Image (cartoon, helix red, strand yellow):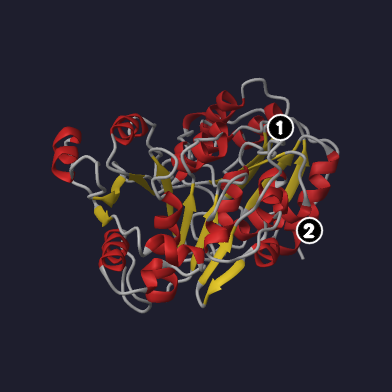
Amino acid sequence: MSDIRVPTAFKDPEPTQEARAYSPSFARPATPPAAAAKREEFIGFAKDQASAALLHAALAPHLHGNSQIHVVSFRASLAILAAMTTPKIVLIDLSGEDQPMNAMMELAEVVEAGTTVMAIGETVNVNFYRTVTKGMGVKEYLPKPLTQAALEQNFVPIVTDMERSIIGRRDGRFVVFAGTRGGVGTSTIATNLAWLIGDGLHRHTALVDAELHTGTIALNLNLSVNNGLGTALAVPERVDQLLLERSMQVAGDRLHVLAGQEMLDQDFSYRPGSADMLINALRSRYNFVLMDAGSRLSPFARDLLGMAQQRIIVMDPSMISVRNLDRLQTLPVGPTQAPRPMVVLNKAHTPGGISQAYMEQTLGLRFDAVIPDLPRIVPKTTEFGTPAASLRGPFRDAIAALAKALGATPSGEAA
């Protein structure tokens, strides 16, 4: 048990000359001076007593030595850090700062490079979260009000250097599907690809229907729906493995499905940052996480497309699909995302449709997968809750080619 303390006040020391001279960004690899003093393991700061108490309860069992949480303002935290050799892990509270992004840049000037930084604060904004965690090197950020469950899930793995921390997770591959318009078969492609990876290649796979009002994935697989996904988005601090276990429906030996069905006359509650917590929890458990964002591009769907490692855009041989593909490709690319989306032509050679050759010439690309129009096979299997990819033939071959392009290999083989 750590001797972590929660003092009510801390005298703000003056920064030393040595501390002023050495203040690189924590987002860069550590290159400490040759004569640097021994670094402590941890130091934490909280602006209020309630937050400090919660942090103490969650972290104390996992900290050792003279690890402390000081109840002080952000400005006092900067002064303390500037006057000392920066511990290996720093927990900072941004509460009360009008410009939290500027505050993070000031913090980077007083801690040594390579420091693991965790942050809490009052800002509830997905863009802020992405910027500080992906662009500035912060390991994790949690908005207030804090809960013990959220701290144990997100902060404890970091201080214990466990693989559940965001950088050290299993990091299952995260793929998001989007359609150029309704009815192009986005859900069908996502469902069959997930089934093939899970049951055919024996990789642990999660399939999520992000269309909470009109999604069809659960119906296509003859599964029930529940409020688990809606809860995860409305109350992100409740996202943990227990919630996932209760909400995921079993669709195969290694395929689990998460789907909801919100009331049509009500908007589902989506809090900024909710998608991040859900995706992190899923990626820590599954080899592949596939999400169907549909074609309506709700705020939730747009966030998913921004966070995806790989986007897959599904289109049919129509002029509206050609037009909308060009628009979808203008969406900003996330920091961990492949430079271009994969494009799938579904229902190829449909009577009256545009030819594949003309589409590729017009769009200036080659399709990553071409799935023929099979009106006698795909709709029939869907009606009985059976994936069309379970039948040998051109549809399964096309889905298998798409899986290979994603790097999905049989269990036991290197991806």
- Judge whether 65 appears above or below 306 on screen: below
Report the disc number at residue 200.
none
From where the camera sits, is residue 391 visible?
yes
Amino acid identity at mark 1: Glu
Q: Whole-Å distance between the Cαs marked 2 and 1? A: 28 Å
Which residue is at the front of the view, 209 or 7? 209
Secondary structure category for the residue under label 2: loop
Q: Residues within 10 Å of mark 2 (few under 14, many from 20)?
A: some
Place of residue 3 in the rendered image (x, y in percent of width and height, measured from the top left): 78, 58
- Judge whether 395 appears above or below 278 on screen: below
Which residue is drawn at the image coordinates 55% and 35% (left, top)?
A: 298
Place of residue 324 in the rendered image (x, y in percent of width and height, measured from the top left): 35, 32
Q: Is residue 326 left or right of residue 281?
A: left
Residue annotated with mark 2 = 3
Which residue is drawn at the image coordinates 62% and 21% (left, top)?
A: 99
Which residue is drawn at the image coordinates 86% and 38% (left, top)?
A: 8
Residue annotated with mark 1 = 122
Place of residue 241 in the rendered image (x, y in percent of width and height, measured from the top left): 66, 64
Q: Is residue 331 left or right of residue 145?
A: left
Which residue is drawn at the image coordinates 48% and 64% (left, top)?
A: 170
- Judge whether 330 appears above or below 210 on screen: above
Residue 121 is drawn in which quadrant?
Answer: top right
Amino acid identity at mark 2: Asp
Q: Is residue 268 left or right of residue 406?
A: right
Looking at the rendered image, the disc whose residue lies closer to the viewer, 2 or 1, is 1
- Quadrant where the C terminus sits is bottom left
Which badge, 2 or 1, comes first in the chain's sequence?
2
Secondary structure category for the residue under label 1: loop
Residue 248 is drawn in which quadrant?
Answer: bottom right
